[in-house]
Amino acid sequence: MTAVERGVHVDASHPIDIAEHLAERQQWDVDRVTDDQIAFAVEGAWRTYSLSLAWHSFDETLRLICTFEMEPPEERLSELYRLIEAANDRAWLGGFNLWRDEGLMVYRYALTLRGEASATPGQIDAMMKAAVEMSECFFPAFQLVAWGEQSSDEALSAVMAEAVGRA
């Protein structure tokens, strides 16, 4: 049992109930949209991210989306799409899409719970953390390509460079 699971005491095994409890523990602004959907805002280092989790009983899938505003100039779209492809090669748990009509960059991830499987608090917490961590990691690169006019390779190198030494 993980530390997250020990700290979460949710009577129901509904994944949205678990997500709601985890979000409240983090003191995130929570909006229970329906019995099967929750939305909340997470303050990151770069910006506030909007997260939404939705339970789809027909295919027994818990879907997460994490969004942030991204309205790049038309002339930067092809380079931004190259960067999204490269970022998705490095994002093993989910992937990015640009929803141009909505002006949003979206990180998506799904957890399949077929055969009456139950999501654990640890799994749901990991989903939410991965969404924010991936968004935080790649946000600067998306900005460098969209507004700094860097190539996708340059922007990716800048965000993927590992720090040497310790502060």
Image (cartoon, rainbow, N blue to C red):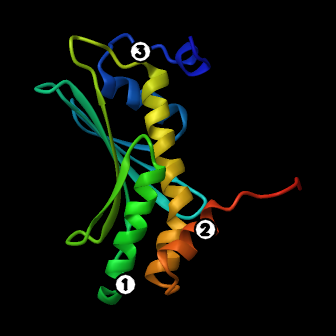
Residue 62: image x %, image y %? 28, 31
Q: Quadrant of the N terminus?
A: top right
Location of the C terminus by quadrant is bottom right
Badge 1 marks a residue whose secondary structure is helix
Q: Which residue is disc 2 drawn over?
A: 157
**Horizontal placement of 113 versus 19: left or right?**
left
Quarter where residue 15 is shown: top left
Q: Residues within 10 Å of mark 2 (few under 14, many from 20)?
A: few
Q: Residues within 10 Å of mark 3 (few under 14, many from 20)?
A: some
Is residue 72 shown left or right of residue 55? Answer: right
> Mark 1 and mark 2: span between their CA atoms?
18 Å
Which label lies toward us, 1 or 3? 1
Q: From the viewer's perspective, is residue 80 above or below residue 21?
A: below
Q: Does residue 70 sit above or below 125 in this rendering?
A: below
- Residue occupied by mark 3: 10
Q: Residue at x 52, y 70 (%)?
A: 141
Q: Which residue is mark 1?
A: 76
Cα distance between the residues tagged 2 and 3? 42 Å
Q: Position of residue 138 (x, y in %)?
A: 51, 61
Looking at the rendered structure, the secondary structure element under dot 2 is helix
Picture residue at 15% right of the left edge, 25% below the top:
57
Q: Nearer the viewer, mark 1 or mark 2?
A: 2
Task: Name the mark on residue 2.
Answer: none
Provide residue 149's location: percent of width, then percent of height.
49, 87
Q: Position of residue 45 (x, y in %)?
A: 61, 59
Mark 1 crowdedness (10 Å alpha carbons): few <14, some 14-19, many ≥20: some
Q: CA distance from mark 1 to mark 3?
A: 46 Å
Foreground residue among 148 and 101: 148
Residue kind at label 2, given as amino acid type: Ser
* Residue at the spot 19% in from the left edge and 24% down from the top edge: 60
